[in-house]
Image (cartoon, rainbow, N blue to C red):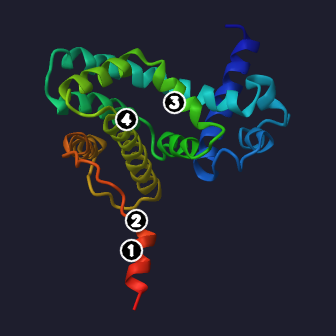
């Protein structure tokens, strides 16, 4: 790489780091490209646009920076889980690649909180979702989990998939925040935290399914209660 290319690469990395932190702290919508450039130590306030394009492109670059490392761990765990009919084995493949990635990052880290903020931004959340849909290992892990629960109705399956995503994301974000602030956490390590999270996610997927019943006519009931 030429000297100019090395400088450009270093600038891009500084921008990614600054943006991840600011987005994690304040949310994507509240942070401007100008603020990111200033936090990255760039005198040119158009540096973000020059190196990445739009804010969505910047968010996508941060997601991809972490996704490549997480996908590598997913593939490793997937190789060990193939053929298993245990829900826990497949849930571990979902949880541990994320927590192991957070464990090797310096404290404070920002990625878990960044991801949680992106998921609350209607204009940006599809970037995280699209990344998940293009992960071959993640698709295979979800297929393996589904095979363990063949009788689970499709609407319930979709519902529990969303619950799993939110539980993982916000549990990791809360722990990351506590570590950054030096507060005590329920579990001493990310590995132990993953074990507890796996327990909870397994419980979500294996919980009983209550048959739907007709919704009560609340208006009629309230009128009946109000009648003399």
Among the two numbered marks 4 and 2 on one chain, the one whose residue lies closer to the N terminus? 4
SS of the residue under disc 3: helix
| Pointer 3 with pointer 4, Cβ within 8 A | no
Asked if residue 166 lies left or right of residue 45, the reply is left
Disc 2 crowd, CA 10 A, few/some/many (<14, 14-19, 20+): few
Where in the figure is residue 69, as x and y percent of width and height? 43, 23
**Of the pair 99 and 55, the residue shown nearer to us:** 55
Figure quadrant of residue 56: top right
| Pointer 2 with pointer 1, Cβ within 8 A | yes
Asked if residue 222 lies left or right of residue 65, the reply is left
How far apart marks 3 and 1 lie (CA) works out to 42 Å
Extreme residue in the bottom direction: 228
Q: Residue at x 39, y 51 (%)?
A: 175
User: Any mark on residue 184, and which?
Assistant: none
**Of the pair 146 and 126, the residue shown nearer to us:** 146
Figure quadrant of residue 137: top left
Among the two numbered marks 3 and 4 on one chain, the one whose residue lies closer to the N terminus? 3
SS of the residue under disc 1: helix
| Pointer 3 with pointer 2, Cβ within 8 A | no
User: Any mark on residue 158, and which?
Assistant: 4
Among the two numbered marks 1 and 4 on one chain, the one whose residue lies closer to the N terminus? 4
How far apart marks 1 and 4 lie (CA) works out to 33 Å
Q: Which residue is mark 1?
A: 221
Q: Which residue is mark 3?
A: 129
Q: Which residue is mark 2?
A: 217
């Amino acid at each position: 790489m030429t000297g100019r290319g090395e400088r450009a690469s270093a600038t891009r990395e500084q921008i990614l780091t600054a943006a991840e932190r600011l987005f994690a702290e304040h949310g994507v919508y509240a942070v401007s490209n100008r603020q990111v450039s200033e936090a990255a130590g760039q005198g040119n306030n158009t540096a973000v646009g020059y190196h990445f394009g739009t804010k969505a492109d910047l968010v996508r670059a941060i997601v991809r920076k972490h996704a490549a490392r997480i996908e590598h761990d997913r593939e490793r765990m997937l190789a060990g889980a193939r053929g298993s009919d245990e829900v826990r084995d497949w849930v571990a493949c979902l949880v541990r690649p994320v927590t192991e990635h957070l464990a090797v990052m310096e404290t404070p880290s920002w990625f878990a909180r960044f991801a949680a903020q992106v998921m609350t931004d209607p204009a940006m959340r599809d970037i995280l979702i699209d990344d998940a849909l293009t992960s071959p290992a993640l698709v295979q892990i979800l297929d393996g989990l589904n095979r363990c629960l063949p009788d689970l109705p499709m609407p319930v399956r979709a519902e529990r998939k969303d619950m799993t995503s939110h539980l993982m994301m916000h549990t990791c974000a809360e722990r990351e925040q506590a570590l950054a602030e030096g507060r005590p956490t329920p579990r001493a390590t990310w590995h132990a935290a993953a074990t507890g999270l796996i327990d909870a996610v397994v419980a979500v997927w294996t919980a009983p399914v209550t048959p739907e019943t007709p919704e009560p006519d609340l208006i009629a009931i309230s009128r009946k209660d109000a009648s003399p």
